[in-house]
Image (cartoon, rainbow, N blue to C red):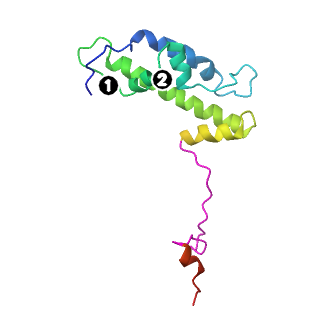
């Protein structure tokens, strides 16, 4: 990926800001019933707000790759940034799963957030012997079995 064009705002100085944003969530990730635990969830929008950048800028940074000789886009900086974003998503999932199951979050909102993490609200209607498998189309449904 070419990094030509406008200089990026990305830099090592932003990483502690992201860490500070995530710290309250990480501190209580294993004790979510504690009254001191944050009531919300960490979000990319929250990070963008903290860094005073747009969400689209933050999203584009997720595609950054280290560049040999670049003092900003070092392997360490890019790797740490991507790890922090992974941590954000992990914390988002942990908080939403726990609070969604314990009634701390609106079920509809919890369901939407969990869908972002690969969870689905569906029921598998296929029986072990295949007798309850869905028919292929409307006409198959009404054919007489002989």
**Residue that mark 2 sits on:** 55
Which percent across, then down, holds residue 128? Answer: 59, 70
Which of the labelled discs sits on residue 57, or is there none? none
Q: Quadrant of residue 141?
A: bottom right
| Residue at the image position 52 percent from the left and 25 percent from the top | 44
Q: Quadrant of the N terminus?
A: top left
Give SS at disc 1: loop
Q: Left or right? Give the position of 50 relative to 110.
A: left
Lower sequence index among marks 1 and 2? 2
Q: Nearer the viewer, mark 1 or mark 2?
A: 2
Write down the residue under mark 1.
65
Mark 2 closeness class: few <14, some 14–19, many ≥20 residues within 10 Å: some
Q: In screen coordinates, is 125 left or right of 53?
A: right
Most distant residue in the front direction: 139
Examine the rendered structure and indicate whether residue 35 appears above or below residue 90: above
Instruction: Locate residue 93: give its quadrant.
Output: top right
Q: Residue at x 50, y 13 (%)?
A: 52
In depth, the one of 132 and 5 nearer the eye is: 5
Q: Which residue is painted at 32% across and 20% down in the image?
A: 75
Circle 1 residues within 10 Å: few <14, some 14–19, many ≥20:
some
In which quadrant of the rendered image does the C terminus lie?
bottom right
The percent coordinates of residue 72 (x first, y second) are 33, 13
Magenta residues, as a range? 118-137
- Please give the name of the residue rendered at 31% of the width and 17% of the height, measured from the top-left corner: 74
């Amino acid at each position: 990926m070419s990094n030509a064009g406008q200089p990026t705002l990305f830099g090592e100085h932003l990483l502690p800001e992201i860490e500070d944003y995530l710290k309250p969530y990480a501190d209580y990730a294993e004790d979510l019933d504690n009254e001191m635990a944050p009531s919300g969830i960490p979000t990319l929008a929250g990070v963008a707000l903290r860094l005073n950048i747009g969400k689209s800028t933050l999203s584009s940074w997720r595609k950054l790759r280290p560049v040999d000789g670049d003092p900003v886009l070092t392997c360490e900086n890019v790797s740490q940034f991507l790890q922090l974003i992974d941590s954000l998503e992990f914390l988002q999932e942990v908080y939403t799963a726990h609070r969604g199951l314990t009634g701390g979050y609106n079920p509809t909102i919890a369901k939407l957030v969990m869908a972002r993490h690969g969870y689905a609200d569906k029921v598998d209607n296929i029986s072990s012997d295949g007798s309850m498998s869905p028919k292929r189309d409307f006409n198959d449904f009404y054919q007489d079995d002989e």
